[in-house]
Each structure stands twice: as structure tokens, then as C-alpha cells.
Amino acid sequence: MAVTNQLGIDPDKYKWGFHDPEKYVYKSRKGLDREIVEMISSMKNEPEWMRAYRLHSLEHFQQRPMPVWGANLAQIDFNDIYYYLKPTEKKERSWDEVPENIKNTFEKLGIPEAERKFLAGAGAQYESESVYHNLKEEWEKLGVIFLDTDSALREHPDIVREYFGTVVPPEDNKLAALNSAVWSGGSFVYVPAGVHVDIPLQAYFRINAQNMGQFERTLIICEPGSYVHYVEGCTAPIYTTDSLHSAVVEIIVKEGARCRYTTIQNWSTNTYNLVTKRAVAYRDATMEWIDGNLGSKITMKYPSVYMVEPGAKAEILSVAFAGRGQHQDPGGKVIHAAPHTQSVIVSKSIAKDGGRAGYRGLVKIYSGANGSKSAVRCDALILDDQSRSDTYPTMEIDEQDVSITHEATVSKVSDEQLFYLMSRGVKADEAMNMIVRGFVEPIVKELPLEYAVELNRLIALEMEGSVG
Amino acid sequence: MADLEIKDLTVQVEDKVILKGANLTLSKGEVHALMGPNGSGKSTLANVLMGNPFYQVVKGEVLYKGQDLLAMSPDERARRGLFIAFQYPVSIPGVTMSSFLRTAVSARRGYDKELMPVGEFQKLLKQKMDELKIEPAIVSRYVNEGFSGGEKKRAEILQMAMLEPEIAIMDETDSGLDIDSVKVVSDGVNRMLERAKGTMGILLITHYSRILHFIKPSYVHVMFDGRFVVSGGPDLAEELEQSGYEGIKAQFEVIAAEVQAEGAVRRAGKVFWVEH
Ligand SMILES: Nc1ncnc2c1ncn2[C@@H]1O[C@H](COP(=O)(O)OP(=O)(O)O)[C@@H](O)[C@H]1O
Ligand SMILES: [Mg+2]
């Protein structure tokens, strides 16, 4: 039974993986050096400052050692990756202009005719670059800019230059440096002061070429008093060799504005998903990260919020599911650098079939951030004896006048719960499913409906065959 | 042949023998009350009948409609019409009552891949909730999560009404309910019995005879230390109400001593005990 949703993911098909014949106008050679970076920049006709920025970042990337404090990344071979691909020569603006083979891919993903209209409001990244980008007219009227970042650099160079790299500088970490050197695609969102964008902005993208790194760069700017909900969901076909995804997301939430960023990621199980996501929240601003991580070989992702002015708020909700051979290392960081700032972190992780899932987090409260509050709750559910959960909560509190709570639970699915559900006629595997769905429900209920459905379906898929 | 035949059922938890050879037959259309002091093994019996993996059956058999009940998984037992209203229902965080009920009713009604149509389900649910005077808000709450004692008991009976079992075990559904609630629940159960027209049987486990004024049993059994020690008609419940379990206990001890001495199967008045 092929059930799809607006994301268009048909899990039955996904399970087997599929890919289009690779038909790229340009395909770079593997590996990374000055020449490749120069070439990327010139292919994109970028301004000089961006070229220099990329080269500077490359230098930093080359000097910086691999991080060793987290998951094992030793198997990544940076020389065995294509850093840039360009699927078509020109940008597509409307559905009719989208090339046939790309339509076919959407077709394969099971997006029915009726839902294409919905898609028309979204920017979808296909391969390294967006080919399909259509702005809803209402948003344009409101002055909202929603483009792929390459186009934004061409069309709004001043805004991009003002903010690019200000939240996540290349020096931040090795993978941020890598992204800064070779980034391509990603979304650029600009919401003018006081504008509330009612419909979530959605980006949909997937990796296709084997061994192709994907390095999208997302930049969101919320002017004072504005509101936006940005949603990204992505899925990758199953391949046999390792694939690297290393994105950078930078968000600026100005006074009284609110930004919600929702991600549901389901990478194929050979993907390294190493993402730097960070937001800065100013006076009375609110930043919310909602992050669902399934699939991938290793995911390291710690969305963070720097609360730099009084009254700023942060909320980070994350779900991670690790199956066989997978290591999910998600978490969150909240930095209280001003008085009366508030943060909430809720993390739910599930491990099965020998997978590892956990939580790695930081709560930092600077001296002088009086009256601040932070609440952290991380729950782990372990489905069998081979799987494990690790929790690394770090607290750095340099202020007395604060309120902090931290709760952590690790549980197994209880036989009593399974028996209760089964005593009502529910089969063992479905009973296990229900318990797991219930476990993540506090986060699922925060998602837009189609993503909630999506996440539940993906979890059901991951759960298949978990009960003997 | 009775629909439920329990023969010489011996059950232990870890090293402790709890049921010591229980025998009972029950058929659709009958209401059996099972009474007995705390710790005598009533809930153990109920759980074993439903297939709780915590309890080990070491001896004996149970036939359900002539088939080996103990060989079936709990979900299969439920789909075939066995039901238990638990004394201590567990909570399932994050799963709403309505989605749980829809999944359960669909399973019971033989939907395999998809669920029962939502409209039909809602109609059924509303009808049953009205009959049991249950607050509609309960179905959007998580299963038993934060329910009061009374809410849990009513939710169990709602599940019973929705699943339309053939044999239902009610484990101390009345304890923890005020008298008005006992009446509402009893009315609900009597309505189920009426509608079922002889196709439903009940094993009504209770500590007190109170609920038996509302749901009239045809048989009353008393369990003591893992065995059925007394069986009789409705008047046995009245008798117990007067004398408490102490009277039974005294008789039981006399007979137990005799059996110990003579190694025989004994019967005295209404009290019997078969040695195994
Ligand atoms: N889960 C359990 N773990 C340990 N002992 C148990 C458990 N369930 C029941 N028992 C023991 O079995 C005996 C019978 O208990 P139970 O069946 O609950 O009796 P009743 O329902 O008649 O009060 C008691 O001694 C009780 O302590
Ligand atoms: Mg009991």
C-alpha cells in the first residue's frame, strides 16, 4: 500500500533505495584542494569576498585536526569525495520547467499530482544545488526572501555578506571550516520586521550521487518582531559506500522575533551526518530547534542557541533513533549570556539492534545572567540488550541566581506494558511500535502534521522485525 | 463442554508456588464470582489466563473452547474473545486512549492491515462512553497516565464494552470505586450481558460482596491459598459477608489437617479440597 504525504516519501520504496542515472552537466574530480575551491567559486560566479572566504576556510580545515571527543570519524576519507556537482545549467522557477528526470525522481518518491501544488511553495534541493525554487506570491508581497543560498548571494549580496559566517565562523570547528570552503545550496530566509509567515517554509532535498558530499549552507534572518517556521526533511537512497553530509545552519533572531526550525532527517545508513546548527537570540527573542534524526551511520548534531540579550528564550527538542551499526550522538547547547534568559532541552533517544543513541549537551550560564532558567530532560529507551545509550550532560554555571533542572531517564520497554497492549489483541510488534511512538510523542506533537505522520512511519519502518 | 476449563492449574513466580492446583469451569452466559482474601491468588489466576509472561505454569491445563489456551499468545487470546479488566492497569505514556482503543477494536474485529474506519469507530466509542457515563475527554488522554483509581477502573470497563469479549475476567473492578460508580459500572456490565444474549461469560473477582448486589452471579467460588476451597450459589456470598473469611479459614484448616493425616480427597459441607 503506497501511502505518501507532502514530503512524498514512500517507505516501501525507500526501503530498497533507488537512484537516477547520474546525468550531471559538470562533475568535479574527487578530493579537495585550492584548485577545487577556486573552481567551485568561479563556476558559481561568486564575488571576490566569498572566494577569499572559501580559501581562508580551506586553510583552516586543512590545519585543524579531526575532533576526537565524540563519535568515531576516523573512517571518513576527505579525498574520496566529490565536492561539487551541478545538475542543470539554469535555475528552475516553476514546476513546468523542472527537467523530466528530476520530475521522475519526485515521482519515484511518490509525490502525487495533487501535492505538487504544495511543493510549489517549497525550495527543494536536488543534488548540490537547488533546481526547483518557487516562492509563494504572498511571501514575496510581504518582503520575505526565500531562496537557495547561491541565488541569495547573487540577488541579495549585501544581506548575505552582512550575516554570512557571523554565527558559525569557519574557525568554529573542522567541519564548519569544510562547509565554509565548499558549501553549495542550502536555504536563505529573510523575514522583515513584524512579518509573521503563517505557512511553514519547507525545503526538501536528498543526496543522489554516490560518494557525494553535501554541504549546504542555510542562513535565516528574523528581523525584530517577526515569526517564521522553517522545515527541512530529507531522505537519502541506500548506497554501499560512505557518504558525507556536513551542513551549516546560521540563524539570527532579533528582538521579539521567534524562529522555529524543524528537521526530520533520515539518511541512508552509510552517511556521516555532521552538522553545525546555531542561532543567536536577541532581546525577548525565541529560538526553537526541533530535530528528528533517523538513519545515517553517525550523526553528530548539537543545535545551539546563544541568548545574548535579556529575555531571550531557547527550546531544543530532539529525537534520535539508532539501529544496527548506527551511532546517533545528538544533543543541544544553550548559552545564557544575559539576564532572565530561559532554555528548555528535551531529548528522546531510542536504540535497538546494537545501535547507540544518546545525548550530549551543554548548559552554560555566564556570570551576570541572573534570573535565568534552564530545564534539561533526556530520556533514553533501549529496546534490547545489545543496544546502548550514553548521556553526556555538561553544565557550566557561573551565576548564583539561576534555576536549573536536569532529569535523565534510561528505560527498557517493560514487559508489563507489552502485555497490557497484547491483552487487548495488539500483536507484539505493533505493541512495541505503540510504546516507541508514545515515547517520542512529546516531540512528534510539536511537528506539522505531515511531518508527524512521516516520523511515525519512519519509526515504524525502523521497528520492523524488532520483535521475534 | 464448558467454554473455559481450568484443570489442576499450578503456577509459580520465581520460586514461590502461588496457584496450587486450581480447577474451574465456566461457560458463556454464566457469571461466576471469585472471592477470597488478599494474596490468595485471584489476580494470579486472572493474569495466567490472559498469558502474562511473568507467571510460570508448572502443571495443569486450560482449555478455551476446547483448545489449549496456554499455548496461545496474549494477543491471540484477546482476539479470540478473552478479556481481563486489570486490577492494576499500567500506563502507556504518549499513546492516546482513542488510538489505543481503535487499534484494539480493529484487532478484535479481524482488521488485519488497516484499522476500522474512523467514523464507525467514533460512533461506537461515543455510544459506549455515554452508556458508561465516561467523560469524553478521557479518550484524548494517554492510556491510564495520571488517571485516578476510579478513572482507571472505568477505562478498563470501557475497553471491555468496546471489545465485546466472550469470556471476561473482571479483577476487583469495584475496589476503589464509590457506590455510585459501582452502580454505573454494574449497569454497564448488565447491559453487556443482556445484549450478548448468552454469548458472554464473566469471572467476577471481588474482595467484597458489594458489587454482587448489582451484578448477580450464578456461582460463587472462594479461593484460599491458591486453591478453590468453596463453591456455591449466590447465598454463599451473603454468608461470607456475615462471617468474613475467618469462618472459611477455620474450616479450611480443619480439612487441610485431615487430608494431611489421611491423604484423601475430602468433602465437608460446602467445603471441599482435592489433594494433588
Ligand atoms: N508479581 C508478583 N511478584 C511477586 N509475588 C507476587 C506477584 N504477584 C503475586 N504475587 C504473590 O502471589 C500471591 C497471590 O497474589 P495475588 O494473585 O495478587 O492475590 P489476590 O489477587 O488474591 O490478592 C501473593 O502472595 C503475592 O505476594
Ligand atoms: Mg488481586
Image (tube, coloured by chain):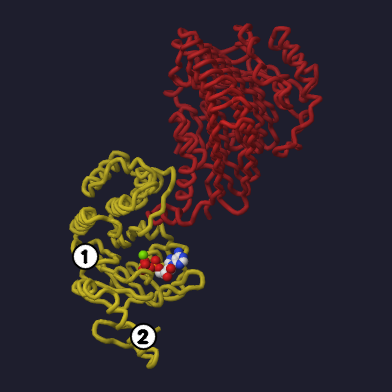
Front residue (pair A238, A271): A271
- Taking the image as shown, residue A5 lies to the left or right of residue B158, namely right
Q: Chain of mark 2?
A: B
The structure residue drawn at horizontal position 62% and vertical position 22%, both measured from the top left corner, is: A249
The structure residue drawn at horizontal position 43% and vertical position 30%, both measured from the top left corner, is: A449
Is residue A238 visible to us here? no
- Taking the image as shown, residue A291 lies to the left or right of residue B250, namely right
Front residue (pair B246, A137): B246
Gap between marks 1 and 2 measured at Cα: 29 Å
Rendering coords of residue A387 (x, y %): 62, 49
Quadrant position of residue A153: top right
> What shade does chain B have?
yellow
- Chain painted in red in the figure: A
Quick check: do tags 1 and 2 share a chain? Answer: yes
Above or below, B91 relative to B80? above
Q: Quick one: which residue is furthest to the bottom in this view?
A: B262
* Mark 1 or mark 2, earlier in chain: 1
Instruction: Identify the amino acid type marked 1.
Output: Leu
- Taking the image as shown, residue B238 lies to the left or right of residue A32, namely left
- On residue B256, the disc is 2
Above or below, A296 relative to B28? above
Check disc 2 and report its element: helix, strand or loop. Answer: helix
Front residue (pair A311, A63): A311
Instruction: Identify the amino acid type marked 2.
Output: Ala
Check disc 1 and report its element: helix, strand or loop. Answer: helix
The structure residue drawn at horizontal position 46% and vertical position 16%, both measured from the top left corner, is: A197
Rendering coords of residue A106 (x, y %): 53, 25
Quadrant position of residue A182: top right
Q: Chain of mark 1?
A: B
Q: Which residue is mark 1?
A: B212
